[in-house]
Image (spheres, rainbow, N blue to C red):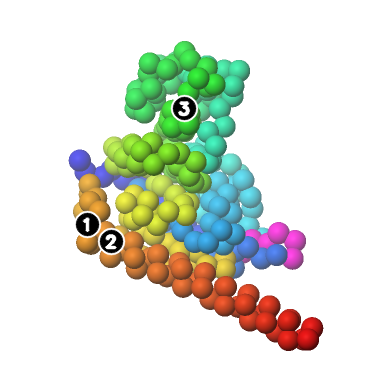
Amino acid sequence: MSEQKNGVEIRIEKVNKDFGKFQVLKSINLTIQPGEFVALVGQSGCGKSTLLRLISHLETPTIGDIYLDEQLVERINPDIRYLFQEARLLPWKTVIENVKIGSKDRSNEKALQALKEVDLVDKADEWPAVLSGGQKQRVSLARALVGKPKVLLLDEPLGALDALTRINMQILIEKLWREQGFTVVLVTHDVSEAVYLANRVVLIEDGQVALDEQITLARPRKKDSSFAYFEKHILDRVMRNKDNMEDSEDEAFNSLSAFQR
């Protein structure tokens, strides 16, 4: 199956994001090609999810600009769809009604097609309350797909799922990406997931791009020695920063203790 390229380019230029006196992102420069699958990894609080929210215009940069195919992002764009860690379905609407929210014309036919793509047509008339966690996320994915997005932003949507469901969702997301060709940006704490899904893995450290690694593995990907090389290389880099942070915290604690003595 060949990978289509129906997505758009995302270009991030010298972006800073401050929350009060706290600087979350610092002069981020990043270009994501049309139809590319990029994973953002890093320690909690490094700014991964903030960057995703800036791309979607749920937040605005303090400094800098973000472009989609040379168009400055100045408002929420219907070509960009966002999946959160929670499915965020409306409990008072059926599955198909939740999916229809994602299309401009509220088309029943398009909603059924989107549910077919995520293998949930048989749940169309069910209520969200009776669905499993994985099924809810598939409904959320169908709601995003029904709008025929050019960019899909994934903010740890698989983080709360059990291991088997998570693997099945990874396979589904990769399949839909390869068939439809939208640009994907995935935020994840799971380096193995990042290597399995992405063309590139970008490490964010202290609000900056610290590593931008091309994943040159053939698809479908197998967790062999080549996979293990990329996984270890990236994980070692992530953990090195964690060790440095812990060393700095220990030094600060020891200095304070010595001062108090």
Specify the amino acid type for callout 2.
Ala
Q: What are the residue bounds of the magenta stretch?
A: 14-21
Separation of residues labelled 2 and 3 (CA atoms): 32 Å
Residue 164 x/y as whole percent: 36, 38
Report the amino acid beneath label 1. Answer: Asp
**Number of other residues with Cα within 10 Å of mark 1, as a class: few under 14, some 14 to 19, many 20 or more:** few
> Which residue is more in the foreground, 202 or 240?
240
Q: Which residue is mark 3?
A: 132
Q: Residue at x 31, y 63 (%)?
A: 230
Q: In the image, what residue type sits under mark 3? A: Ser
Q: Secondary structure at mark 2?
A: helix
- Looking at this view, is 57 or 161 the one in front? 161
Q: Quadrant of the N terminus?
A: top left
Q: Quadrant of the C terminus?
A: bottom right
Q: Mark 1 = which residue?
A: 224
**In percent of the image, x 52 and y 17: which residue is there?**
127
Q: Earlier in the sequence, mark 2 or mark 3?
A: 3
> Mark on residue 228?
2
User: Residue drawn 48% across and 44% down?
Assistant: 159
Residue 252 on image: x %, y %: 67, 79
Report how many numbered discs are placed on residues in the image.
3
Q: What whole-number distance in Å separates the C-alpha atoms at marks 1 and 2? A: 6 Å
In the rendered image, residue 16 lying in the magenta stretch gets the answer yes
Element under label 1? loop
Is residue 64 visible to the viewer in this orientation of the structure?
no
Task: Kindly tell me whether residue 109 is visible in this rendering.
Answer: yes
Q: CA distance from mark 3 to mark 1?
A: 31 Å
Badge 2 density bin: few <14, some 14–19, many ≥20, Cα 10 Å: some
